[in-house]
Amino acid sequence: MSTATLNRSVSADEAEILALGADLHKAHFEKDPEGIAAPFAPHAVIYDLEPPLSHDGISVERKRKWLATWETPIELTAENFKVVVSGDHAYGYGYLRMSGTKKEADRPISFWMRETMCFERIDGAWKIVHEHTSVPLYMDGSLRPAFDLQP
């Protein structure tokens, strides 16, 4: 996440949250499952692309298995990510592009998702307590993911 996406000065809390996002993106690029799990609260509610419908916290082992399916580093790029802080709670939303090459793919992939995160200051540090990632579906009866959309 980049402060360049914000059109105003950011508060110290917003800057900490954006830095947390940058660390999360770096952990994906480095295929570091512990680094991916680090910014999440232990029982964060996760609605990501992988079944089931929700996860209770981040499983380092589940992340390790998923990371092993990638041939290349995983690049995450945030676009139009906005952060709103109120006391010890905050939320952020925007678009997230995931790029890289899966081991079973014959070409690189790159697609945009919608991303919403809720944060809570726990013991003085911001933690992700909720994450919702989604890809729109075409409503033409095909239920195809709309991987061709861009912000």
Image (tube, grey):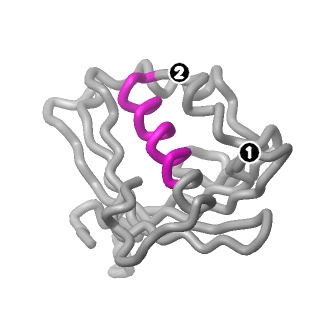
Label number found at residue 92: none
Along the line of sight, the residue nearer the viewer: 32 or 4: 4
Q: Secondary structure at mark 2?
A: helix
Residue 150, percent across and down? Answer: 24, 69
Determine the residue located farthest toward the right in the rendered image. Answer: 123
Q: CA distance from mark 2 to mark 1?
A: 28 Å
Q: Amino acid at mark 1?
A: Ala
Q: Is residue 52 left or right of residue 98?
A: right
Q: Are marks 2 and 1 in contact (CB under 8 Å)?
A: no
Is disc 1 placed on a helix, strand or loop? strand
Task: Please name the residue shown 32% across and 59% down the image.
Answer: 112
Residue type, numbered disc 2:
Lys
Return the mark for residue 125. Answer: 1
From the top left corner, tell me how far across and down residue 78 is, in percent.
36, 57
- Point out the image quarter for the C terminus: bottom left
Question: How many other residues sit within 10 Å of disc 1, few (<14), some (14-19) or many (≥20)?
Answer: some
Left or right, 44 with respect to 11, comes to right
Residue extent of the magenta highlight = 18-31
Q: Is residue 17 above or below residue 139?
A: above
Name the residue at 76% across, 43% down.
41
How many marks on residues?
2
Numbered label attached to residue 65: 2
Residue 20 belongs to magenta span: yes
Q: Quadrant of residue 114?
A: bottom left
Magenta part, dominant SS: helix
